[in-house]
Amino acid sequence: MENNKINFIELQATDLKEIKKFYGNAFGWTFTDYGDTYCDFHGAGISGGFTKTNKVTTGGTLVVLYHKDLSIAIENVKKNGGKIAVDIFSFPGGRRFEFIDPNGNKLAIWSDK
């Protein structure tokens, strides 16, 4: 591991079973459970986990995933229970959309295509 590099991202979830189903089906992530209140996720390009909480709070940080085809990504989010917060829009260098997962976390997906 390198000093001063992002190494891990931790997200919140009120229902770990539901959140694993969403990210597993929508993005193909896999999980390692550590008791009833925590699981790591794998396949996201960075190490991370979900911690069980009574209420999901959001802050100023936005986690952004990449997908080469936003039309596939947005359909995967919708059909697995995610809600689109900001529809696909263009910006210098690409396009992206933002979504809310079934537990209330806000993320985005971008593409350079």
Image (cartoon, helix red, strand yellow):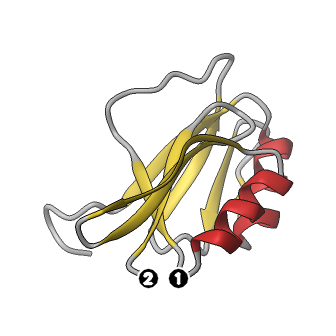
The image quadrant where one finds the N terminus is bottom left
Residue 30 seen in the current view: no
SS state under label 2: loop
Residue 79 seen in the current view: yes
Classed neighbour count for the residue bearing mark 2: other residues with Cα under 10 Å, few (<14), some (14–19), many (≥20): few
Say which residue appears at 77% left-offset and 52% top-offset.
78
- Give left or right: position of 6 versus 58: left
SS state under label 1: loop
Residue 84 on image: x %, y %: 64, 43
Mark 1 residue type: Lys
Marks 1,2: beta carbons within 8 A: yes
Which residue bears the numbered disc 1?
68
Whether residue 52 is situated above or below residue 27 in the rendered picture: above
Say which residue appears at 23% left-offset and 66% top-offset.
92
Classed neighbour count for the residue bearing mark 1: other residues with Cα under 10 Å, few (<14), some (14–19), many (≥20): few
- Give left or right: position of 86 versus 34: left
Q: As rendered, which of 41 and 111 lies closer to the eye?
A: 111
The image quadrant where one finds the C terminus is bottom left
Which residue bears the numbered disc 2?
113
